[in-house]
Image (cartoon, rainbow, N blue to C red):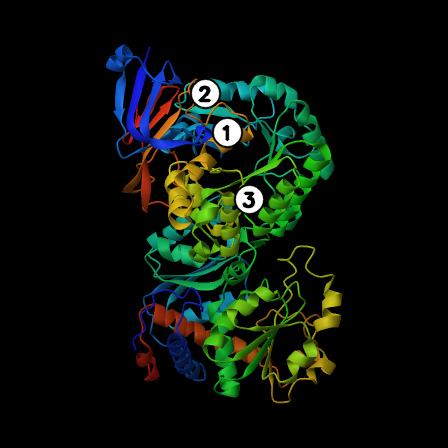
């Protein structure tokens, strides 16, 4: 099956087969990352613009790395340096970038739905690098890629996502990806941050940590995004930690072979204690490395590449 | 003396319970029982065969943006949109720039309204600057010509201030129109809170924030005896609160918009800002409850909340686009489709909701074909199917969810004070 999408906007709109294609392509790129010379010429001559209108370190660097390893030219800029601060609209900013001959835009934006909006305005591919509380497709892809690496097939596997689900685009994209791949997803956290509305997305909602952790194969922690919340969602970070923080005792409730994940940035001592974050069960840094491969796959496929061409050597 | 003879139409006048094929006569701007033989010879004849002839439609909730935001709409363009939609009487909200909290702004609006093709009535603010902090001069505003008080868009949050506002306004027999929203529960909210907002990652506006203020207003109305009108009711719970209040004989009324009876939050799947309004589209259960409320009289009338915004203002990220859609030119066909076709309302009932009952809320001299009344008429073809095109339409703005859609039911002629102001797609 050829890849036919020009944009990567959401996981929700992808079929299971498309997710598999992305993961397979990422697998091929992941092997390249272990080579001495990591660069491949797949996107030579293409220019990718990282339009990051919301602060990001990891995702932006990861996309830059991915673009460079594909031999694309990459230009990144963030909100502070952009003309959006002078009152220019997103449409105008993006159309100018397109007029400057960019071949692709990677967009990070605080407003949900803005990548879809941009994809309708522009003729070039748009990759969603996180939109508001909506989706963060490449994060979910790198997460399931990492889970697959550790656990194999995810069908029937139990994944617990613990933390601030309401404001999390990572949670939403993971919910879509994992349910499409047949995993059982339970979301856990305070009732104000894990509302029952999520059940309509095919997941279980729990506010009871111990029972949720008992049979988990994966525990994915999310940062408490207190900068996004109003004053009313929960009492304090201290209360959150005391009720839901993953510490040594609570980690012992999890099966020994389960893995612990976190999309970062982690707040040590809040949602996760250091000894757990740094333990052998933690795959947090492997997630980061796999992120490069997944983003290479996303850029490569949306630029018109085909999965089968990557499985053979690219030199 | 200008004479009009509207012939052979299906004449529907809920006020006189008239619904049969016949003629309507107009002389000197008023309806008359009939014309003399001599008058008939000189009268201008409108052949209404196959058409419905009803009172000019009445909308007690429009935003004409003048003064101050004339890039969105003006009193003239808004009135033209009204006429094209069959509306002959509209009530303008006071959230202009400056807001209508002083007699001078009322005078300005009235002078502009005098040149408009339909009857345009201003409202005044409940509070100074619509800031919700101190009472605006209701008495002076009434002397200047307002017909009701409202801080539409910015619900008065202080219960004490609202209490005193309705108590004070009652002295002038002025109705308070309230946009029911507890702001503390809707900070940065852009759509209904629920499954859909969760899926889309958008900040939710819980219907409880409307219900709480509807309940508060019912309590204050009962406590003071003042008339409070709930604008654009959107939630099933609010409909239920209104039903009980009316059963208890409390002096409250309420309206529903065409979009809240036609659409739900499901329409937001593509983040189309032409479906973003405040209060937001809600669930199918809410939509059905609003229709049930219109059916049993719990909700009194249709109001469009015609809210024009310039294209570049709406063409943005969903979070940043302003709330509101235009509705005057689509209200009649949308209500015919939703209420008559899909929910089996009788046509006279729907016309009642859009004419007499709307006018009665503010005691406006409109909404009937009774002899002696001001001759405002809407003549429409209930069967004609047409494509609504915002660019060809009369509103200055294009923010409609029905753009390029096929609608059934089309206004052919609009008559205001005995004068044809709109006919066959053109302003006269």
Q: Say which quadrant the C terminus of chain B sits in.
A: top left
Which of disc 2 and disc 1 is earlier in sequence?
2
B184 or B10, which is in the foreground?
B10
Residue at the disc numbered 1: B359
- Residue B66 relative to residue A121: left or right: right
In front of the other: label 1 or label 2? 1
Residue at the disc numbered 2: B112
Determine the residue positioned at 56% across, 82% down.
A158
Q: Secondary structure at mark 3?
A: loop
Residue B248 location (% of width, % of height): 66, 41
Q: Are marks 3 and 2 in contact (CB under 8 Å)?
A: no
The residue lying furthest to the bottom in this view is A256
- Residue A55 relative to residue B86: left or right: right
Mark 3 Cα within 10 Å, few/some/many (few <14, many 20+)? Answer: many
> Marks 1/2: CA distance?
22 Å
Which of disc 2 and disc 3 is earlier in sequence?
2
Residue B6 location (% of width, % of height): 30, 24
Q: Can I make out residue A68 in this image?
A: no
Please report, as a chain letter, where disc 2 is located.
B
A30 or A155, which is in the foreground?
A155
A306 or A153, which is in the foreground?
A153
Mark 2 Cα within 10 Å, few/some/many (few <14, many 20+)? Answer: some
Please report, as a chain letter, where disc 3 is located.
B
> Marks 3/1: CA distance?
18 Å
Residue B239 location (% of width, % of height): 58, 47
- Residue B407 relative to residue A264: left or right: left
Residue at the disc numbered 3: B233
Please report, as a chain letter, where disc 1 is located.
B
């Amino acid at each position: 099956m050829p890849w036919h999408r020009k944009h990567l906007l959401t996981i929700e709109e992808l079929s299971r087969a498309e997710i598999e294609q992305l993961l397979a392509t990422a697998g091929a790129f992941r092997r390249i990352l272990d080579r001495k010379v990591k660069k491949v010429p797949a996107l030579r001559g293409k220019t990718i613009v990282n339009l990051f209108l919301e602060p990001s370190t990891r995702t932006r660097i990861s996309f830059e790395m991915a673009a460079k390893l594909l031999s694309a030219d990459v230009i990144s800029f963030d909100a502070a340096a952009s003309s959006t601060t002078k009152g220019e609209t997103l449409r105008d900013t993006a159309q100018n970038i397109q007029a400057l001959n960019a071949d692709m835009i990677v967009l990070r934006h605080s407003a949900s739905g803005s990548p879809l909006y941009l994809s309708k305005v522009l003729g070039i591919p748009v990759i969603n690098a996180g939109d508001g509380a909506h989706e963060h497709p490449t994060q979910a892809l790198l997460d399931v890629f990492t889970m697959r690496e550790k656990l194999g097939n995810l069908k029937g596997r139990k994944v617990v996502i613990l933390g601030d689900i309401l404001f999390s685009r990572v949670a939403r994209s993971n919910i879509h990806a994992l349910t499409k791949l047949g995993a059982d997803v339970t979301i856990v956290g305070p009732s104000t941050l894990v509302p029952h509305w999520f059940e309509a997305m095919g997941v279980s909602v729990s506010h009871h940590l111990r029972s949720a952790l008992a049979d988990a194969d994966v525990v994915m922690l999310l940062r408490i995004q207190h900068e996004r919340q109003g004053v009313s969602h929960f009492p304090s970070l201290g209360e959150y930690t005391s009720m839901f923080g993953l510490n040594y005792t609570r980690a012992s409730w999890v099966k020994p072979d389960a893995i612990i994940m976190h999309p970062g940035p982690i707040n040590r001592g809040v949602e996760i204690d250091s000894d757990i974050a740094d333990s052998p069960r933690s795959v947090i840094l492997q997630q980061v490395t796999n992120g490069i491969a997944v983003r290479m796959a996303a850029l490569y496929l949306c630029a018109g590449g085909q999965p089968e061409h990557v499985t053979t050597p690219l030199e | 003396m200008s004479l009009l003879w509207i012939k052979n139409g299906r004449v529907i006048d809920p006020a006189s319970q008239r619904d049969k094929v016949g003629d309507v006569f107009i002389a000197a701007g008023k309806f008359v029982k009939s014309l003399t033989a001599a008058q008939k010879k000189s009268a201008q004849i409108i052949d209404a065969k196959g058409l419905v002839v009803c009172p000019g439609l009445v909308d007690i909730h429009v935003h004409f943006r003048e003064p101050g935001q004339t890039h969105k709409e003006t009193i003239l363009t808004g009135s033209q949109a009204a006429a094209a939609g069959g509306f002959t009487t509209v009530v303008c909200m006071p959230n202009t720039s400056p807001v209508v909290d002083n007699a001078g702004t009322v005078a300005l609006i009235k002078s502009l309204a005098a040149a408009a093709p339909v009857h345009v009535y201003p409202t005044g603010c409940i509070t100074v600057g619509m800031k919700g902090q101190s009472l605006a001069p209701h008495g002076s505003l009434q002397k200047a010509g307002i017909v009701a008080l409202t801080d539409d868009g910015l619900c008065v949050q202080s219960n004490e201030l609202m209490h005193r506002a309705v108590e004070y306004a009652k002295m002038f027999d002025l109705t308070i129109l309230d946009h029911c929203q507890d702001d503390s529960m809707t900070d940065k909210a852009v759509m209904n809170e629920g499954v859909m907002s969760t899926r889309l990652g958008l900040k939710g506006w819980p219907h409880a924030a409307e219900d709480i203020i509807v309940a508060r207003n019912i309590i204050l109305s009962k406590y003071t005896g003042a008339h409070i009108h709930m604008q654009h009711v959107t939630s099933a719970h609010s409909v239920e609160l209104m039903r009980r209040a009316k059963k208890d004989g409390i002096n409250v009324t309420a309206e529903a918009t065409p979009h809240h009876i036609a659409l739900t939050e499901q329409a937001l799947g593509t983040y189309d800002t032409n479906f973003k309004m405040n209060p937001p589209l809600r669930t199918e259960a809410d939509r059905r409850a609003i229709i049930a409320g219109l059916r049993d009289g719990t909700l009194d009338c249709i109001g469009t909340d015609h809210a024009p915004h310039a294209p570049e203002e709406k063409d943005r990220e969903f979070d940043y686009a302003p709330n509101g859609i235009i509705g005057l030119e689509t209200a009649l066909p949308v209500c015919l489709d939703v209420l008559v076709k899909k929910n089996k309302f009788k046509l006279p009932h729907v016309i009642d909701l859009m004419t007499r009952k709307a006018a009665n809320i503010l005691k406006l001299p409109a909404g009937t074909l009774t002899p002696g009344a001001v001759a405002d008429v809407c003549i429409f073809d209930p069967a004609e199917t047409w494509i609504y095109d915002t660019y060809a339409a009369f509103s200055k703005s294009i923010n409609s969810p029905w753009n390029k859609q096929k609608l059934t039911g089309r206004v052919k002629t609009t008559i205001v004070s005995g004068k044809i102001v709109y006919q066959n797609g053109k302003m006269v």
